[in-house]
Image (tube, rainbow, N blue to C red):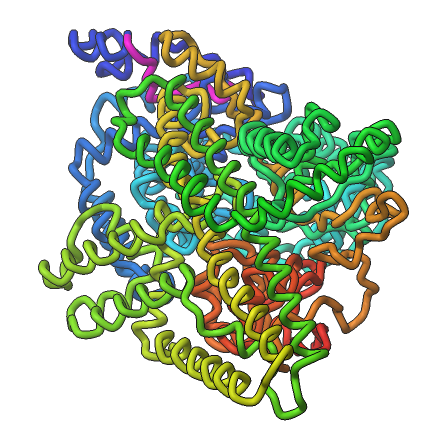
Amino acid sequence: MERADSTKLQRHELNAADAGGPGQHAVPHERQERDQQYDPLILPLDASEATLVLVGGKGASLARMAAAGLPVPGGFHITTIAYRRFVAANALQEAILAAAASGSPDEPATLERAAGEIRGLFERGTIPEAIAAAIRQAYAGLGAGDREVAVRSSATAEDLPGMSFAGQQETYLNMRGETMLLDAVKRCWSSLWTARAIGYRLRQGIRSEDVSLAVVVQELVPADVAGILFTANPLTGARDQVMINAAWGLGEAIVGGLVTPDSVVVDKTTGTILAQEIADKAVMTVRTHDGTGDEPVPSDRRAQAVLDAAQTAELARLGGQIEQLYGQPMDIEWAMHNGQIFVVQARPITALPEPAGAASTEWNLPSPNGHYMRASVIELLPDPLSPLFATLGLPAWNESTTDLANTIGIGDELHDLNMLLTIDGYAYYDVTFTPAQIVRLLPALPRVAENIPPLLMRAQERWEQETQPAYAAVARRWETHDLQTTRAAALLDGTHDIVLAAAQHYISIQSGILPAAYMSESLFTKVYDRLIRRPSDPPALTFMLGFDSTPLQSERSLYDLALWAREQPSLAAYLARATGVQLAAALARQAIPAEVADAAWQAFRDRFATHLARFGHMIYDLDFAKAVPADDPAPLLETLRFFLSGQAADPRARQAAAASERDHATATMLEQRRGLRLALFWRLLRLAQRYAPLRERALADVGLGWPVLRRMLHEIGRRLASAGAVASADDVFWLTLDELRAAARALDDGQRVENVQESVAERRARWEHMRHMTPPVALPLKGGAKLMGIDFSRWMPARTDQANGEVIAGQGTSPGRVSGLARVIHGPEEFALMRPGDILVTKITTPAWTPLFALAAGVVSDVGGPLSHGSIVAREYHIPAVMGTGVATARIHSDQRVTVDGDAGTVTLVD
C-alpha cells in the first residue's frame, strides 16, 4: 500500500488537463483566467491549497493529515470547481434548486421525490471532456493497471462545528478502471442531494445555493479489519479515554449499522485496555467484482476479538496524534491490512457530553486575587464571545462605561477603566478594587450621590432625545452606502462607529431607564403589599400588565400577517406546508413558488419586509456574530406558521383583557382609598407604569444597528473568502479586530491575505466546547461574590451553586404552577423545535424571543430576575416562570417532564 506522499501530481500537468488533456493547449481566454486566479480541477491529496472551499470537509481533513505524515492512503482530490463546471455544462442548477426547495423535512416523501428528480438530472448529465481527462490522468498517477480505489464524497457544508453530516453523501469502494471511477464520481456528485442530506440542511438552515461537493479518490485499503476510533469516550465524555469499535472486513458494515462491533475502551496515556466487549459479529463487508457486498463471518471468528492489546495501543497512540493535530476530540475511521493501520477519515466529535465534574473546571482568572462577575449587559451574552465581538464590542462598552464614570464624577479615580473582559471566552465584569482605588473613591462618593439623581430624572429624555437618535442616525448613514464599492478599511471603521453608538445607547439605558424601572416597580410593589393592599385586593402585578411594548407590537404584527395570509388560499396552503427555513429561502431567492398566486406572494413578501423593517433588529444575543431576524427570518416564519394554524390566542384580546383588569383595579383603588395612602399609591403607581413599557422599548432597540453592521462585516468576509483567506463570509466573526484590520489593509492594497482557515476552525471548535460549560456568576468560585465585606450573591442574575437532585431552585418571577415537557432552546436556530404546551428552557430571553411565549406553558431560564424581559413577558402571557436557576439548560433535557412553580421559585424534574 502506497502512502499519501506517493502521489506527486504536478500542478502544471493538471492545468493542462483542465484545458482538454495532456499535450493540449488552453484557449487564450482560459489561460488568461488561470493566470488571474488558480483554479484547479484536481489537487494532490496533501496539497496546501486543499481548503474547505475547494475539497470539502472530508477532503480538507485528509489533506491536513496527509501533509502531517499520518498514514493516509495515497490519492487525489476532484475539486468543487469540477462539480460546478459539470452542473453548469449540463445547465442543472436551476432545476436542482427548484427540486430541493420542494422538499419539506417534516414530509419524507417530498424529500425522496426531490432527491429522485435530482438523481435523474445527474444520471442524464455528461462529464465534460476536460474534467474526465484530468481525472483519468490523476488516476493513472496512482499506479499501473486498473488500480482499486475508494471514491468518497466531500461536501463544503460537511463536518462543521456543532453539525454532523456523516453518512449523508456516498462513498464507493473497490472501484476499478476509468469507467467505474467516472461513474462513481458522478454518483458522488449526485449524492449531495440525497433525501437525508436535503432534509438535514433544511433543518439546519443551510441554503442549497451555498453547498458544493468535491470527491476524494484514494487507493483502496483491502481491509482485514476496520472500525471507528473516538479520542474521547463518547458515552461518558472522559477526555483521558479512547473508545475503539472494530469489526472484520471493510468498514462499511459498521458505518451502515449492519454489525455490532467489538468495543474497547483504552487509557489514552498508557494504552491499557480499561474495558472490552466482544460482540457476535455476524456480517462483514467484502470486495466483489463490481464493488462491495456483505457475507457471513466464518463461525470460528464471530465471537473472536478483532484486535489484540498491541493493536489497540497503537490505535490509541495514532488517535492521540490526530487529536493533537486538530486540538480537539476526534471521530476517526480507520482500516487495517496485514497489521498496518490507515486513516480514511477524521472529523471533530459533534455531540460529546461534558465529563463528570466539568462544571467545576478551573477557570483561568486574569488575576488570582481578582473578583469577576456576570451581570448587567452580560445577561445578554449567555455564550462564549466571538473573537470579533470580544475585541471590537467589549472595548466599545468599556469606552462608554468610562464616559459614564466621568459623568458621575469618578473618571479621575478610575482612569483606564476596562471593566469588561473575557475569562475562558465568557464575558465578565472585573470588579476588583485595590485598597488604593477604594481610598481614592471615598472622597468622591458625595459627588457621585449628587450626580446620579439627575441622570435618573433625565433617563427618558437622555434615551429618547440623545442616544437613541444618535444610534439610529449612524445606522441609517451606513444603510445608504454602496457596501460593495466601499473600501474594506472604511467598512471596518464604520462598524466601529456603529458598535460605539450601540454601547453608548445601552449605557444610557443602563444608567437611567433600567434602574428607574427596577426601583419604581420594586418600590411600588413593596409599599402596596405592606401599606395599602387588603386581603381582597388584587396583587401588585395586576397594575403592571396590559401596557404596549415593542415586543408585543412585533407579536401583533406577525399575528395580523397570519390572519391576512389565511384569506389567501394558495398562499395559506404553501405557508402551512413549507418550513420556516424553506420560506426564508424562497423569500431570499425572490422567486414565486409555483403553487402560490403571484399577487398573493408579492403582497406577502412586501408585508413581511415591512415587519422586518420595524422589528428585524431585535437581538437574540448581543454578540453581533449571531444573526438577527432581519438576516435570518426563519424563526419568525415558524411562529407565523403557528399563528396561521389557529392554535394561538389573539394577542390583542389577551392584552385588552389585561388592560381592562388593570384599569378596573386602579379605579377600584382610587374609589376606596383616601388621604395619604391614596396619594402614595397614585404617585408610586404612575412612576412604575411610566417606566415599565419604556424599558421594553429601549431594550428592543439595542440591536438597532446590527443588521447593517452584519452586512458590512459579511461584505469584508466575502472578499476574504474570495481571496482564499477564510472558507466563508461568516468566518469574519472568528477573527480578532487586529487580524481583521490587517486583512482589510491587504485587501485594499491588492496584497496577499493570510490564510486563517485553520485558526478559524480551531476557534469555532474551542467555542463549541466552552459553550457547554456553565460559567459561574462570580469568580473565584469561593467568595467571588463578596466585595468589601458585602455578599452580593442575592442580587446576582443566576445561581450556579445548585445541589444535585430533582429540584432546581431559582426566582419565581411569574406566578402559577404547570407541568409539561421541557424544550431546551439554545438559540433561534432551534425555535422550530418548540411545540405548543412545551416548557421553554433557555439560558436567557431577549425581546426577539417573545414569539416563543405564545407556544410556551411555562418558562425556565439560567439567567434573569423578576424584572428581566422573560419575566415581564411571562406575566403578560399569564404563564409560570422561574428565572436565574444558573443550571437549567445543563440539568434539564428536552422531552423531560418538569413542573414549574412560579410561586415557590422551583423547577422539579419529574422524570
In the picture, the quarter occupied by the C terminus is bottom right
**Image location of residue 143, percent across then percent down:** 45, 19
* Residue toward you, 812 or 65: 812
- The answer to whether residue 681 is left or right of residue 592 is right
User: Is residue 40 located in the magenta-colored stretch of the structure?
Assistant: yes
**Is residue 804 shown above or below 537?**
above
Main secondary structure along the magenta-highlighted residues: loop
* Residue toward you, 715 or 251: 715
Please report the residue visible at 55 percent of the width from the left and 74 percent of the height from the top.
682
User: Is residue 50 located in the magenta-colored stretch of the structure?
Assistant: no
**Image location of residue 277, percent across then percent down:** 77, 56
**Image location of residue 505, percent across then percent down:** 49, 40
Q: Residue furthest bottom?
A: 536
* Residue toward you, 824 or 380: 380
- The answer to whether residue 890 is left or right of residue 537 is right
Please report the residue visible at 80 percent of the width from the left and 55 percent of the height from the top.
793
Instruction: State which region is magenta.
Output: 36-46
- The answer to whether residue 513 is left or right of residue 196 is right
Please report the residue visible at 85 percent of the width from the left and 52 percent of the height from the top.
791
Q: Quadrant of residue 843?
A: bottom right
**Image location of residue 543, percent across then percent down:** 53, 76
**Is residue 25 shown above or below 95?**
above
